[in-house]
Image (tube, rainbow, N blue to C red):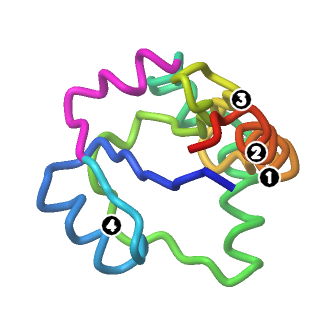
Amino acid sequence: MDARIVFVGNGSPAQAAHFAMDHAGEHPVFSDAARATYRAAGMRKGLFATLHWRTFANAWRAFRNGFRQTKVEGSALQQGGVVVFGAQGQVLYLEADAAGGDELDLDAVLAAVRASSVTAPKH
């Protein structure tokens, strides 16, 4: 596959570096404190997306599975998601969280990544 993983956070560059050390392994981490990337992807930001009833259900699910929220870095009101780009920069898959803690459709993400390797130009 010709896919790469890149993390984009909305915290400071120092917070991005901290995330990179703790979670990203070999993958690059970028800071977008202005959240231009999030806006371009149509990802939600706001109190009602953050305090959505599903956020509390998602937090309970995560807690039951052993995950613990520590401090918040960046904008707590910004929801995330995933974007898979093709070799020519086209969006192959976009999934934006509607509420905090929404689970990604990993099967759909992997299908888009696999499709990107089929459509990628051969070097």
Task: Label 2: state its secondary structure.
Answer: helix
C-alpha span from label 2 to label 3: 7 Å
The quarter of the picture where the N terminus appears is bottom right
Label 2 with label 3: CB-CB less than 8 Å = yes
Task: Label 1: state its secondary structure.
Answer: helix
Which disc number belongs to residue 86?
A: none
Which disc number belongs to residue 106?
A: 1
Type of residue at label 2? Val
Identify residue for label 4. Answer: 71
Pick the front one: 105 or 90: 90
**Label 3 Cα neighbours within 10 Å, binned few <14 / some 14-19 / many ≥20:** some
Identify residue for label 3. Answer: 93
Looking at marks 4 and 3 on the same chain, the residue that comes earlier in the sequence is marked by: 4
Looking at marks 2 and 3 on the same chain, the residue that comes earlier in the sequence is marked by: 3
Label 2 with label 1: CB-CB less than 8 Å = yes
Pick the front one: 14 or 50: 14
The answer to whether residue 101 is above or below residue 45 is: below
Residue at image location 71% in from the left, 29% down from the top = 93
C-alpha span from label 4 to label 3: 30 Å
